[in-house]
Amino acid sequence: MDATLIGLTSILTAGLTIAIGSIGPALGEARAAAQALASIAQQPDEANTITRTLFVSLAMIESTAIYCFVVAMILIFANPFWDAAVAAGAAAGG
C-alpha cells in the first residue's frame, strides 16, 4: 500500500511539475520575443545585437522548463523515496 501511494504521488507530482513549470517559461519567451520584435521595428540597425541578446535570454528562460523536466524524470524513474517505501513494506509484511 505504501509503495502504491508513493508511486501515485510521484506520478501526480511529476505531471504537475511539468504542467506548472512550463507555463512560466512559455509566457516569458513570448514576452521576450514580442519585445525583441518591437525593438527591431524601432531600431532596425541594431537587429543583430537584439537578436543575439534575444537568443541568449531565450536559452536562459528555457532552462527553467528543463529543470522542471529533470525533476519530473527523477520523480518517475529514480525516485529517492521508492526504496524506503519498499523496505518499510517488507519490514511490515514479514
Image (spheres, grey):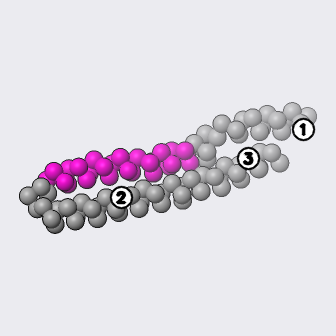
Residue 71: image location, x then y, percent: 55, 44
Rate crowding at label 2 as few (under 14), some (14 to 19) or many (20 or more) other CA atoms within 10 Å: some
Quadrant in the picture for the C terminus: top right
Span colored in magenta:
48-73
**Circle 3 sits in a helix, a strand or a loop, which is it?**
helix
Q: Which residue is mark 3?
A: 6
- The residue depicted at 42 percent of the width and 56 percent of the height is 25
Residue 37: image location, x then y, percent: 22, 64
Rate crowding at label 3 as few (under 14), some (14 to 19) or many (20 or more) other CA atoms within 10 Å: some
How far apart are the alpha carbons under marks 3 and 2? 34 Å
Disc sitting over residue 56 in the figure: none
**In the picture provided, is 24 more to the left or to the right than 4?**
left
Residue 85, quarter of picture: top right
Relative to 33, is 92 above or below?
A: above
**In the picture provided, is 86 more to the left or to the right than 22?**
right
What's the residue type where badge 3 is placed? Ile
Q: Which residue is mark 2?
A: 29
Q: Which residue is mark 1?
A: 93
Q: Is residue 1 magenta?
A: no
Residue 55: image location, x then y, percent: 26, 51
